[in-house]
Image (cartoon, rainbow, N blue to C red):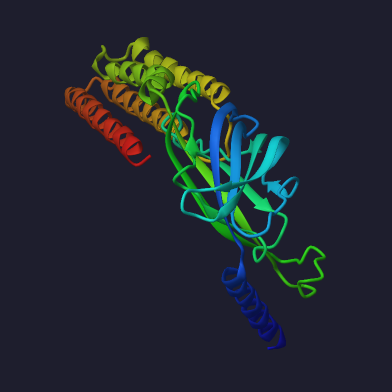
Amino acid sequence: METKYKKVLAVSAALFLALCSAAFARDYRTGIFITDLYDLDQVDSTFSADFWIWCVYDGDETDFNGTLDIMHESSCDLRIYSSDKVKMPGEEELFWMQQKILAKFQCEWNMRNFPFDVNTLKIEIEDNRIRDEVNFLPDGMNSGVSEIIDIDGWKISGFTLTETPMSYNTNFGNPEIDEGGSGIYSRLCAEVTIRRVNPWITFFKLTACVYISILISVLAFFMKPNTDSRISLPCAALFAVMSNKYVVEAAVPSTTALTLLDSIHTASLAVILAILFVIIKTDGMRATGNEKSLRQSMKIDRLAALAIAVAYMLLNAMLLVLR
């Protein structure tokens, strides 16, 4: 009971601090403009970006030089920093801070729908001062991505800029916050959505061998019974699909998730095994020499060819539509 009471108090305290932070926070209209995106590495799960960040605010000057925390970066180079007082027509004087940053970020790549995958590159920034001192207000009007950016194999399809209050279960030793309390910080997040260029061309390059193998396997139903080719063709197709699977795994960055290409290869292997099973069964029926068994075996071959072909096409269509 006491533990439950403590949890309720902790949650209430965090909510109270968030409300207080929102009520008394000093606002800084902040924006991000990305001038370059490069070194997109799906193996190391990283990407690099060059961008400008700025703040426009009133009141006393605030020093941001060295106070910005670039989240999830593996390397960072803080370049140009400037802070000036500016006066807009009909408005009071404002401070305008800007800084250029070059950084390499960690990124989680979504490979489940490769090559139709859509990925989001995130640039997240916090100030090392709590939110009631520095509160970022997204400057969405002036933020964005440079039109001259050209990412090989990708196209930019979206950009968003949002602010989220981040609460940590520590006060980071700040004596202004009660011991064991939560430090709430303002986090600015720029998200760039990217899609692959010509994904269908890439898809057919990686799956052409699989579909040709399935076609050859189905043609075995229409070959002369009890010949080596009826068995050898599906067997060769089975090895071709397995080999293609290894080629795809070598070309596509590995992931623990079941991908679209994994599903297609697995379904293809299952279909070829089903074809082999039917062929062995019908060849055995014809080997008896019984006229009735011969007619039944030929009928089974034709029905199996139609059923397997239709089922495989429907399965592939479903995998592509539901990807």
Q: Position of residue 246 (x, y in %)?
A: 54, 22
Q: Position of residue 45 (x, y in %)?
A: 62, 34
- In the displayed structure, does residue 250 sit left or right of residue 215? right
Q: Is residue 280 above or below residue 228?
A: below
Residue 297's image quarter?
top left
Q: Position of residue 256 (x, y in %)?
A: 58, 39
Q: Nearer the viewer, residue 87 or 173?
A: 87
Q: Nearer the viewer, residue 286 or 311?
A: 311
Which residue is painted at 59% across and 55% down in the image?
57
- In the displayed structure, does residue 222 sit left or right of residue 95? left
Q: Nearer the viewer, residue 42 or 121?
A: 121
Q: Position of residue 279 (x, y in %)?
A: 32, 23
Residue pushed farthest front?
90
Q: Is residue 147 above or below residue 62?
A: above
Can residue 234 be seen here? The reply is no
Residue 175's image quarter?
bottom right
Quick one: quadrant of the N terminus?
bottom right
Quick one: quadrant of the C terminus?
top left
Q: Nearer the viewer, residue 217 or 142?
A: 142
- In the displayed structure, does residue 263 sit left or right of residue 178? left
Residue 8's image quarter?
bottom right
Can residue 311 be seen here? The reply is yes
Residue pushed farthest bottom?
1
Which residue is painted at 74% across and 72% down in the image?
181
